[in-house]
Image (cartoon, rainbow, N blue to C red):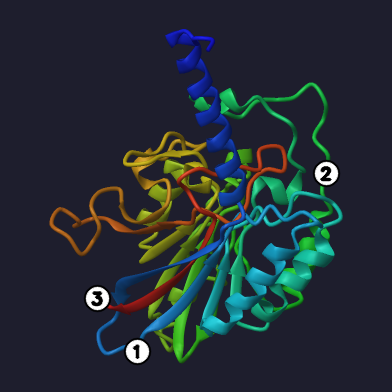
Amino acid sequence: MVSVPGPARAAGALVAAGAGALAWSLLEARWYTLREVTVPVLPGGHAPLRVLHVSDLHLTPSQRDKVAWVRDLATLDPHLVVDTGDNWAHPGSLGPLAQALEPLLARPGAFVMGSNDYIAPQPKNPARYLQRDARRQHANPPRQLPWRELLRLFTSADWVDLDNCRGALDVDGRRLSLVGTDDAHLDRDAFPDAGGADDARLDAARPVDLHLGVTHAPYRRVLDRMLEDDADLVLAGHTHGGQLAVPGWGALVTNCDLDTRRAKGLHGWPGARPDRSGGAGSTWLHVSGGLGTSPYAPVRFACRPEATLLTLVPA
């Protein structure tokens, strides 16, 4: 029998573990899950309001399983759908995306665009995400996606475009005011001024029951402006929940200046949750871990792709 030296055995075990982790991460990237959270944010006496938050589908034409899974979300019977961007990753994805979202577009909705709604993903060195600012120019110019067609898909369904805009919706007998920004990761954000004709809070005859903030990338400058604007709840995406997480620790990166402990899920901003001690002066923040990945890094580890049903109840 040939004896295998200790270092060689250790190296072999390490390679096997790495191969196993890679195989699992490829599977996990298609293991979609629905998160459900309750947010005590409505005025007293209100019935629950169901808000479906979808983000970062990064859909490619071949992802039929994702199309079917997203379509099935309509069975949750949400009162409102909010899409926080990065819907596709290929210029041929508009048809599959329209099919995926078709039953949701029949419901009241609002949306903002993400960087990968405008430009297609490119191959990148994964180590760049560990840099302080992961945004880098590439030698090849980015490939533009037909984003105006995506915009028409949403607006033709009467979804409210919140890219650097305000809006309003009547949902299940409640009056919602909304404020949003275009993608801060591309520095396209310009927070809309209050007091304009589209500011629903100015109509004293129709009091607002909830003020909702929507953005793609949860950069601190945007979240601070949402807080100053008295948003009751802010919805964002972009982070992929870290995409590759360490079990028992969590995300290593957020791909923006948000801290990693808030890479996904329901939190308070800038401090504790408003319903907990120390939460005074904070608002609610929900960051979706998203449903997809870049086609050039189709892996997730300890961070399943997700959509979230938020049930809003009286505070």
Q: Say whether disc 1 or disc 2 marks the residue closer to the N-terminus.
A: 1
Disc 2 target residue: 144
Q: Are marks 3 and 2 in contact (CB under 8 Å)?
A: no
Dot label at residue 315:
3
Residue 183: x and y, percent? 61, 47
- Taking the image as shown, residue 207 lies to the left or right of residue 165, namely left
- Identify the residue under disc 1: 47
User: Above or below — where is 265 with respect to 116?
Assistant: below
Residue neighbourhood size for the residue with mark 2, other residues' Cα within 10 Å, grouped as few (<14), some (14–19), many (≥20): some
Mark 1 vs mark 3: which is more N-terminal?
A: 1
Q: Is residue 230 above or below residue 293?
A: below
SS class of the residue under badge 2? Answer: loop
Q: Which amino acid type corresponds to the residue marked 2 in the rendered image? A: Gln
Residues at discs 1 and 2 in contact (Cβ within 8 Å): no
| Separation of marks 3 and 2 at Cα, in angstroms | 44 Å
| Left or right of 296 in this view: 309 | left
Provide the secondary structure element on which disc 1 rests.
loop
Q: Nearer the viewer, residue 81 or 241?
A: 241
Q: Earlier in the sequence, mark 3 or mark 2?
A: 2
Kindly tell me whether residue 108 is visible in this rendering: no
Disc 1 residue type (three-letter): Ala
